[in-house]
Image: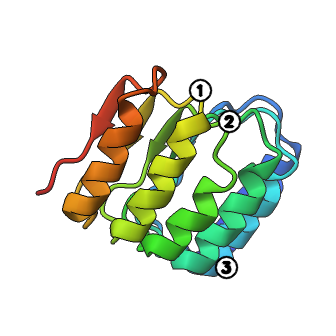
């Protein structure tokens, strides 16, 4: 499915009230497709789980997804792995991640700056239970920042920092 397929899916999600879990993995719909899906998530109140692995939308698509989850308290589980969001996308996403209980950002070229923002957001986050950051480049400094926060965070129960 390309961006046109994402457009059809987005239109459906704007009115559908029964789909709770939705997967859009490896469709390569890029930024344009991310726009359609994020627009739908701004009004959808049924999707709680969303997998958007490997769609190539990068920082710009992540900006749109961040805006979509800003006021969407229904969506609590999101997987954006393999989308090349980097530190910039991570910073945008974490600004609006307060309602997320599960976040998977595996293989997204996240470095030290992204890890610092993740750590900072975990300081006051009282809902996130599972965080997956495998195969990124957070380094020793990023690991330190996350570790320091987890000394006092009592919500996170699963953390993946696997290096591959």
Q: Position of residue 87 (x, y in %)?
A: 45, 72
In the picture, the disc for residue 38 is: none
Kindly identify the residue that appears in the image at 45 percent across and 56 percent down. Answer: 25
Quarter of the picture containing the C terminus is bottom left
Give the residue at mark 1: 127
**Residue 19 image position (x, y, % from top left):** 70, 33
Q: Given contact means CB atoms under 8 Å apart, are the residues at marks 1 and 3 in contact? A: no
How far separated are the C-alphas under marks 2 and 3?
A: 25 Å
For label 3, count other residues whose C-alpha is less than 10 Å away and answer few (under 14), some (14-19) or many (20+): some
Q: Is residue 144 visible?
A: yes
Q: Where is mark 2, residue-wise?
A: 99
| Camera-side residue of 62 and 96 | 96
Q: Is residue 159 above or below residue 97?
A: above
Mark 2 secondary-structure assignment: loop
Residue 83, quarter of picture = bottom left
Task: Say which mark, if any, is on residue 32.
Answer: 3
Q: Percent x, y for residue 56?
A: 46, 75
Q: Is residue 48 above or below residue 109?
A: above
Identity of the residue furthest to the left in this view: 164
User: In the image shown, does 31 or 156 lie closer to the viewer?
Assistant: 156
CB atoms of marks 2 and 3 within 8 Å: no
* C-alpha gap between disc 1 and disc 2: 7 Å
Figure colour scheme? rainbow
* Mark 1 vs mark 3, CA separation in Å: 31 Å
Residue 12 visible in the displayed image? no
Q: Residues within 10 Å of mark 2 (few under 14, many from 20)?
A: some
Tell me how many marks there are: 3
Determine the residue positioned at 31% across, 58% down: 142
The reply to whether callout 1 and callout 2 are in contact (CB within 8 Å) is: yes
Tell me which label, 2 or 3, sits earlier in the chain: 3
């Amino acid at each position: 499915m390309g961006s046109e397929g994402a457009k059809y899916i987005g239109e459906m999600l704007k009115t559908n009230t029964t789909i709770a879990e939705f997967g859009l993995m490896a469709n390569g719909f890029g930024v344009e497709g991310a726009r359609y899906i994020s627009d739908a998530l701004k009004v959808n109140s049924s999707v709680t789980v969303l997998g958007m692995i490997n769609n190539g939308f990068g920082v710009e698509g992540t900006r749109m997804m961040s805006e979509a989850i800003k006021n969407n308290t229904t969506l609590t589980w999101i997987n954006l792995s393999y989308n090349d969001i980097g530190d910039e996308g991570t910073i945008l996403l974490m600004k609006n991640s307060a309602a997320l209980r599960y976040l998977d950002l595996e293989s997204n070229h996240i470095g030290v700056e992204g890890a610092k923002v993740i750590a900072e957001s975990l300081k006051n986050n009282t809902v996130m239970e599972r965080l997956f950051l495998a195969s990124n480049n957070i380094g020793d400094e990023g690991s330190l920042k996350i570790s320091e926060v987890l000394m006092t965070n009592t919500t996170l129960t699963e953390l993946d920092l696997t290096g591959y």
